[in-house]
Image (cartoon, rainbow, N blue to C red):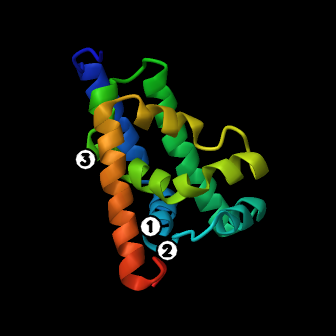
Amino acid sequence: MSSQATATDADLILKLYDLRREAEMRKARNWWVVTFWPENAGDIIKIAQDLGGQENNWFRQLAGYWSMAASLVEHGALNRDLFLEPSFAGEMFLIYAKVKPYLKELREQVSPTFFVRIEDLINSTEKGREQLQRTQANVARRMSKTGSAKA
């Protein structure tokens, strides 16, 4: 369904990538990837309710970034296939895989739109669904090796 990516799509991908290099964004990304391994919905809710806390800021910053970027794709401003390349969106798949087991509860207690754009985008293609399955398997392996992903 996606049309061929254009030079404009490539330019937008590079701009989005450049935004990820900003100093505070790097801290948020590091926290999400290295430190934040929720074991239940409560772990996420606690951070979501700690308005002004550093982890809350990082949580919202990276979740907001990927939700915004997914919206660009969902509204046709950016080529879907190019965006979903693991070399660009792999991090989005990881953060989504970390919260996916708790989405029902999070949508009830935090926001009914919690991660909706990201979920819609990932599920919009077979390639996206397959990448999510691989990412979920990687997350599960990490957690099973340590008994907790936080170790």
Q: Earlier in the sequence, mark 2 or mark 1?
A: 1
Q: Quadrant of residue 78?
A: top left
Q: Earlier in the sequence, mark 3 or mark 2?
A: 2
Q: Which mark is residue 30?
A: 1
Q: Which mark is residue 87?
A: 3
Whether residue 88 can be seen here: yes
Residue placed most toward the observer, 25 or 73 = 73
Q: Position of residue 47 (x, y in %)?
A: 69, 65
How many marks the image carries: the answer is 3
50 vs 14: above or below: below
Q: Is residue 7 left or right of residue 138?
A: left
Q: Residue at x 34, y 71 (%)?
A: 141
Circle 1 Cα neighbour tier, 10 Å, few/some/many (<14 / 14–19 / ≥20): few
Which amino acid type is marked by label 3? Answer: Ser
Q: Earlier in the sequence, mark 1 or mark 3?
A: 1
Q: Residue at x 45, y 55 (%)?
A: 97
Q: Residue at x 26, y 14 (%)?
A: 3
User: Which residue carries the number 2 mark?
Assistant: 35
Q: Is residue 74 left or right of residue 61?
A: left
The answer to whether marks 2 and 1 mark residues whose Cβ atoms lie closer than 8 Å is yes
Kindly report which numbered mark, 1 or 3, lies closer to the viewer in this rendering: 3
